[in-house]
Structures are given as structure tokens and as C-alpha cells.
Image (cartoon, rainbow, N blue to C red):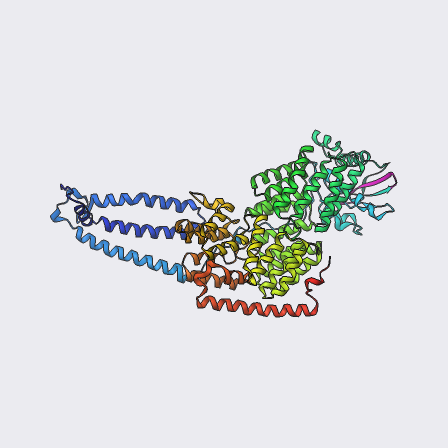
């Protein structure tokens, strides 16, 4: 039929007659349902984010097509016809419209049912990170061809202090062997320590380590002379394959010549082929100065103890070695390594940024002096990893393994990187290689425990941490992470204090280990005891992260907001991306209406959250993304806030709720900001039932993200339940202190 538009109202009437509006409404409701179903099914079917993106794209594309179709065609008793071919008098669009009305009502009913089920019926479900946990079990060391272990050499000198010299020479021989690509396995130094002064027979040691040969020896230093005797033994038969005694003048040249000769003879006895590069490397002397070498060996001996005090002594020795011989690459490597270790959490008074800055210059110099040092490349990988450059770290680790194929440390550090990237199976494979080379290393066994910990397999993690303590009873990190499992997983602040204090006793000079107990005491409502441990940490190092963080928490707990904000600013000087500090300052800005100030602070720290197209939310910044969302809501940037919250929820699905890397109640914080109170309360109930008892007062009393639900009776009941549980734990702590099992900070002496 011929039709012309006489007016705007005529167009609207015609659109209504042809049911275009009804088709548009029906299409939008159907599209919304499809998107919701897709968002639910895609994660369950392990489909990528692209599926929902593609689905939304085609639905948007189809909308104008549907409208054009509704305008141009009409459903008649004879089927689908073009509208222009239908006589107006015979048109049944009014009947079709009534059917569309019923269809739309049905669709809207389905949508309401879906919303009710999503928010009020179905429980909160977050994917179990254990699905991505390492599946490979750790196996017993297997014997490899051309495999060797070097027992601790005997100190045959009259001076007991010469032990560092004896161990250093043995370690250098071990390092030279580990560089040779033809060896199937060279057991690392740390695993050999348990065989010092052992009464075990050689065949038993060989079976325990999975090696075919064992090198043993002794060193005697007297005046300007040194005598080194070594024996190479078949581990299966206890037969001596070769023995030699070296009696030389004590010079650096002679020491390195003896080491090279020993390695070359072992290679010949085992019919191992050397490359030309390896032959040249064996002939290279690290230093020609015996005083520099002696200082270096003393530094290595102290660094191996890994306490704050020993590392500082080691740094002094390495600096002395460098001062004596500025071209001594190994001394630069030792210095850089000591700085990085000193900056590790719970150990030294340095932040990661500070330790990285101190370590980089000597490490760069080491690589200039010896670009083919596998040790230097392994440490470079660690440095780059701590700086957040995963790609550069991976390249460095691969180069380290290429240069030193039997480096347990390189495999261990590379495994750590893969673990932090969530590539747990690869991480376990790398750690298995490290364990094969260093089965009794406390560090490698600890890292296996951490891998299970990060995967949410806390019982397995605890078993590995306890195994570490069997190997090395003074391993402070294991005490700390056992304490963390009790506090962050099992909700037992009382039991965590027992383990935190064991860690503190093992290193009375570590500000981190001393102040960590304050967090548990605050959880139990004992602010006075918490203050003792905060002050203890600040006394040792006032600018260290953990003393400052616990000081901030104590100030907040006791209502001293000014002091808490001052601590927060000092923490941001150490790390501009520190979530807790930003959180405290954000809360102060929100209370004062300084929304733009808060937004600017987040933008300086997390530019990736402000990317115009797609903000990057990941496991490292999701907490700040959630905090930023509330700021944006106050500024009227609702769409960006919603996007950050949805992306944060996606990240939470990849993480365990509990543990050191858990998200705790971040889902509760998101749902509250999304105006979904019942969903938030159910998530809080789930967190409490699972064992969450960490910083309860910090979140439930002070977090503005939870304002929507804080007045709900269910919220108040759950908080009262938590307080009753923690009160019972506080009573047990009082008993432990009365019995002397838990000491006050004043009783902790260096």
C-alpha cells in the first residue's frame, strides 16, 4: 500500500500499528535473558570472556534488523507477507499485538524469576582454585646418569674458624660441576648439609639422593700452606674410583687451579664430555687476590644463615671483597643476592623497592664482569620479578638454566614465577626439578608448600611447612606461614600467636617478625599487647613495612585516625600501590567529601584502572579497584564503577577465599556496592562459616563499602558471633601467657 508520513504523530501511530514498539520491547527482554544465561553458563563451561562479548555483539547487531523486519513484514493467516502487499482492511496487526503483549508479560515474568533466583535462592558460588592446583605429586629423587653429590669437606685445620674456608672451597667445586651440561644431576649444597659428620654409609647416601657417585674430601690450612685431599666413590659399591692429595702454597691462583683440576679429573673418571666453552670457563680465575676470596667466603657463610643480622654481616664482607678486588664478579653477585634476601617479607628492614634499588647496581656490574654467570642471571630474574617485569624475569631464569643446568635455585625461582602467574602445573614441574637437585633444601620444600598454599590446598601446604621444620628447625618463614594458616584459614588467632612467636624467637632482630604478632592481638581485642609488639618492631626499624603497617592498624583500632593516616602516608612512600594505606586515606577523603583527591591518588598508583577502553583488574589490584569504585560512585561515574566491580568479581573466581593470597570478604564488599544486600549477607555468612577471622574489626566497623548492610540485623548477629568466638580465643591466650608459653615483647631479647 502507499503511505506517506504526514507528521511525526503519524509516524508514531504507524510504528504502533505495525507492532514495532512491541517487537523492540520483546527483543530487549529476550536479549537481556540471553546475556544473563550466557554469563552464568560461560564460566561453568570454561568458555573464555570472548563468548559473552561475541554474544552481546550479535544481539546488538540484530536489534535494528528486528525493527526493520517488524516494519516491513506482517504475519497473516496465509503466512509472512510484506506489509505493502497486505490490504489495510484485512490486516490483523491488532491481534498480533495482543499476542505480543502476552509474550512480553511472560518474558518479564521469566526475568523476575531469574533475578529472584540469582539474588535470593542460589548460594554464592566462587570457583575452587584447587581445580587449577598442581596435580603432579613430588616423587623420590631418581638416580640419573653422570650424577654426583659432594659431601661437606672435613676441616682438618687446628683452627675451628677455618670452617668457612673449607665450606667455601667445597661450594666452589660444587658450583663448577653444576655448570657442566653433561651431568645429569649435581646435588645442591643445602641438601648436603645434613650429611655433615654423618655416620651413614656411602651407598645409603647415594640411594637417598639418587646419585651414582659421591665426592668427599678434607682441607687443612697451616700458615701459607694448604692441603686438599679428595676421593671419588662409586655410590652403589662404595669403591674408590679416584683419590688425590694437593699440597700447595696458599694463593688464590693455587686454590682455583686445584678446584679446576678436581673438576676436570671427575669429568674424566665419569667419561663426561666438556664443551670448549666449559673448558675455558674452568680455566678462568674469579680473583687472584686471596684476601678478596677469603672475604667473599666469609660473606657466603653468613648469607647462608639468612637472618637479618647475618645478612648485614655478609654485606660487609662482600663489600670488603669488592674493595680489595673491584673486578671480583662473585662478590658483586653475593652482595646483590644479600640485599634481595634482606628485602624479603618478614625478614629485613628493607622494602622490596629499597632492596631492589640496592641490588641492581652490583648485579649489573657482575653481569658486565661475567655475562655468562648462571648465578647472576638467576638473581637478575628474581630482581625483575620483584620489579613486576615477568617477561624479563622469565628470560633471565631460562638463561640461568642454560648456563647452569643443575642450578636448583634457578629452577626454584622460575617455579615461583610460574606459581605467581597461576600456572601451577608448570610451577610444580619446575619445583620437582629443583627438588631432584636439592631434595633436602628447606627453601625448595618451603616453595612447594607455598605453591599448595597459593592454590588453596592448605592442609597440603601445612604438611610441607612442617616438613621444612624437620629439615631446618630454625626456618623462620615456615613458622610465619604456619601461623598464617591458623589465622587466615582456620580463624584461630590464638594458635597463630604460638607460631608467630616461634618465628620471632628465631630472629629477634627482624622488625617484621617481631611486629607481626600485633595483628593477632588486635583481632583478639588486646590492644595493649598489640602495642608492645608494634613498639618492638618500630624500635628495631621505624621505617620498615610491617612495623608501620601494624602501627597503622593499632592507631585505627584505638581511634587515633590522625596517627593512622600519618602511617599510611609513610607506607605509600615505601610502596605507592600499598592497598591498606590507600584504603585508610580513601576513607578519610570520603568522610571529608574529598572525592577528587581520592580519585587522583588512585590514578597515580593504578593507572591501569583508568584505561579508557578496558581497565585492567587483576590479582594484584582488585582490592584497590573495589575501593576506587566507591569513590567513582560518589563522583557520578557509575558505569566505570560498575565495570570495575564486575571485573573484580571475575578475578575473585580465580582466587581462594582464605589464606595469605585470599580475597577474604572482597565479594561482600562488591555486592554491597552493587546494592545487592542479600547477596552480600550470604557471602559474609559463607566467609564466616569457612573460617574467616582476619581483620574483622577493620572491615566490619570501618569499611564504608559495607555501609549498605552494616545496619542489617543479620549483619549485627554475625558480628556478635565473631566477637564471641574471638573472646574465647583471647581467654586461651591469657592462659598461654600465664603459663609462660607466650612471652611479652619485653622478654624478647636479641
Q: Relative to 83, is 125 above or below? A: below
Q: Is residue 70 magenta?
A: no
Q: In which image quadrant can residue 469 be found?
A: bottom right
Q: Give whichever of 704, 241 is nearer the camera.
A: 704
Q: Relative to 110, is 46 above or below? A: above
For the point 57% across and 54% down, the residue is 566
Q: Give whichever of 724, 114 is nearer the camera.
A: 724
User: In what quadrant of the picture does the N terminus appear?
Assistant: top left
For the point 65% across and 60% down, the residue is 533
Residue 512 drawn at (x, y percent): 65, 54
Q: Kindly tell me whether residue 177 is visible in this rendering.
A: no
Q: Kindly tell me whether residue 332 is visible in this rendering.
A: yes
Q: Relative to 328, is 673 above or below? A: below
Q: Which residues are magenta?
A: 222-237
Is 396 displayed left or right of 199 in the figure? left
How many labels sit on residues?
0
Residue 676 drawn at (x, y percent): 41, 59
Q: Main secondary structure of the magenta part?
A: strand
For the point 47% across and 67% down, the residue is 716
In the displayed orientation, state which residue is furthest to the left. Answer: 89
Q: In which image quadrant can residue 496 be found?
A: bottom right
Q: In which image quadrant can residue 317 be found?
A: top right
User: In what quadrant of the picture does the C terminus appear?
Assistant: bottom right
Is 66 displayed left or right of 748 in the figure? left
In the displayed orientation, state which residue is furthest to the top. Answer: 276
Residue 281 drawn at (x, y percent): 72, 32
Q: Give whichever of 143, 183 is nearer the camera.
A: 183
Residue 493 drawn at (x, y percent): 60, 63
Q: Give whichever of 335, 654 is nearer the camera.
A: 335
Q: Relative to 409, is 256 above or below? A: above
Amino acid at each position: 500500500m502507499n503511505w506517506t508520513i504526514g507528521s511525526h504523530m503519524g509516524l508514531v501511530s504507524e510504528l504502533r500499528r505495525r507492532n514495532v514498539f512491541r517487537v523492540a520491547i520483546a527483543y530487549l527482554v529476550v536479549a537481556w535473558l540471553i546475556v544473563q544465561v550466557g554469563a552464568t553458563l560461560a564460566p561453568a563451561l570454561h568458555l573464555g570472556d570472548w563468548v559473552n562479548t561475541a554474544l552481546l555483539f550479535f544481539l546488538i547487531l540484530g536489534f535494528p534488523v528486528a525493527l526493520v523486519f517488524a516494519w516491513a513484514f506482517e504475519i497473516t493467516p496465509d503466512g509472512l507477507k510484506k506489509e505493502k502487499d497486505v490490504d489495510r482492511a484485512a490486516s490483523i496487526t491488532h491481534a498480533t499485538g495482543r499476542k505480543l503483549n502476552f509474550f512480553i508479560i511472560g518474558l518479564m515474568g521469566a526475568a523476575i524469576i531469574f533475578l529472584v533466583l540469582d539474588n535470593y535462592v542460589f548460594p554464592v558460588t566462587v570457583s575452587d582454585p584447587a581445580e587449577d592446583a598442581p596435580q603432579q605429586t613430588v616423587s623420590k629423587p631418581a638416580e640419573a646418569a653422570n650424577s654426583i653429590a659432594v659431601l661437606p669437606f672435613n676441616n682438618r685445620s687446628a683452627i675451628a674458624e677455618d670452617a668457612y674456608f673449607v665450606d667455601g672451597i667445597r661450594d666452589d667445586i660444587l658450583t663448577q660441576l653444576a655448570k657442566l651440561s653433561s651431568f645429569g644431576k649435581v646435588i645442591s649444597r643445602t641438601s648436603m648439609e645434613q650429611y655433615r659428620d654423618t655416620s651413614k654409609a656411602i651407598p645409603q647416601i647415594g640411594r637417598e639422593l639418587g646419585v651414582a657417585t659421591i665426592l668427599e674430601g678434607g682441607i687443612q690450612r697451616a700458615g701459607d700452606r694448604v692441603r686438599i685431599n679428595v676421593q671419588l666413590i662409586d655410590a652403589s659399591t662404595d669403591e674408590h674410583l679416584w683419590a688425590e692429595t694437593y699440597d700447595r702454597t696458599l694463593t688464590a691462583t693455587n686454590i682455583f687451579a686445584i678446584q679446576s683440576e678436581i673438576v676436570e679429573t671427575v669429568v674424566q673418571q665419569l667419561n663426561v664430555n666438556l664443551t670448549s666453552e666449559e673448558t675455558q670457563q674452568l680455566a678462568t680465575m674469579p680473583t687472584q687476590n686471596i684476601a678478596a676470596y677469603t672475604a667473599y667466603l666469609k660473606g657466603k657463610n653468613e648469607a647462608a644463615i639468612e637472618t637479618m643480622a647475618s645478612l648485614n654481616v655478609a654485606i660487609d664482607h662482600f663489600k670488603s671483597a669488592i674493595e680489595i678486588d673491584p673486578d671480583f664478579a662473585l662478590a658483586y653477585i653475593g652482595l646483590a643476592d644479600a640485599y634481595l634476601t634482606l628485602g624479603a617479607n618478614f625478614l629485613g628492614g628493607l622494602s622490596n623497592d629499597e632492596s631492589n634499588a640496592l641490588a641492581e647496581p652490583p648485579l649489573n656490574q657482575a653481569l658486565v664482569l661475567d655475562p655468562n654467570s648462571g648465578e647472576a642471571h638467576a638473581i637478575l630474574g628474581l630482581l625483575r620479578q620483584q620489579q613486576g617485569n615477568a617477561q624479563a624475569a622469565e628470560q633471565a631464569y631460562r638463561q640461568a638454566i642454560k648456563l647452569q643446568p643443575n642450578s636448583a635455585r634457578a629452577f626454584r625461582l622460575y617455579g615461583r614465577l610460574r606459581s605467581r602467574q597461576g600456572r601451577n602445573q608448570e610451577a610444580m614441574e619446575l619445583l620437582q626439578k629443583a627438588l631432584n637437585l636439592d631434595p633436602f633444601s628447606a627453601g625448595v620444600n618451603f616453595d612447594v608448600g607455598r605453591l599448595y598454599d597459593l592454590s588453596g590446598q592448605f592442609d597440603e601446604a601445612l604438611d610441607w611447612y612442617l616438613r621444612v621444620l624437620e629439615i631446618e628447625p630454625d626456618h623462620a618463614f615456615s613458622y610465619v606461614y604456619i601461623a598464617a594458616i591458623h589465622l587466615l584459614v582456620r580463624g584461630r588467632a590464638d594458635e597463630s600467636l604460638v607460631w608467630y612467636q616461634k618465628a620471632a624467637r628465631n630472629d629477634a632482630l627482624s622488625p617484621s617478625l617481631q611486629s607481626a604478632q600485633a595483628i593477632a592481638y588486635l583481632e583478639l581485642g588486646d590492644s595493649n599487647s598489640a602495642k608492645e609488639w608494634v613498639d618492638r618492631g618500630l624500635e628495631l626499624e621505624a621505617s620498615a613495612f610491617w612495623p608501620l603497617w601494624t602501627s597503622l592498624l593499632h592507631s585505627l583500632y584505638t581511634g587515633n585516625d590522625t596517627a593512622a593516616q600519618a602511617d599510611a602516608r609513610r607506607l605509600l612512600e615505601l610502596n605507592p600501590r600499598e592497598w591498606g594505606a590507600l584504603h585508610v586515606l580513601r576513607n578519610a577523603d570520603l568522610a571529608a567529601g574529598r572525592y577528587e583527591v581520592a580519585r587522583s591518588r588512585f590514578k597515580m598508583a593504578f593507572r591501569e584502572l583508568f584505561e579508557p577502553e578496558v581497565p585492567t583488574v587483576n590479582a594484584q589490584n582488585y582490592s584497590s579497584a573495589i575501593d576506587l569504585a566507591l569513590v567513582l560512585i560518589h563522583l557520578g561515574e557509575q558505569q566505570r564503577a560498575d565495570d570495575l566491580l564486575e571485573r573484580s568479581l571475575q578475578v575473585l573466581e580465580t582466587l581462594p577465599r582464605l589464606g595469605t593470597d585470599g580475597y577474604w570478604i572482597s565479594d561482600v564488599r562488591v555486592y554491597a556496592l552493587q546494592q545487592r544486600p542479600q547477596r552480600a549477607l550470604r557471602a559474609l555468612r559463607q566467609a564466616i562459616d569457612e573460617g574467616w577471622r582476619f581483620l574483622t574489626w577493620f572491615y566490619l566497623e570501618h569499611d564504608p563499602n559495607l555501609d549498605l548492610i552494616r545496619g542489617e540485623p543479620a549483619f549485627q548477629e554475625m558480628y556478635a558471633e565473631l566477637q564471641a568466638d574471638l573472646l574465647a580465643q583471647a581467654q586461651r591466650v591469657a592462659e598461654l601467657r600465664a603459663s609462660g608459653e607466650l612471652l611479652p615483647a619485653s622478654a624478647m631479647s636479641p
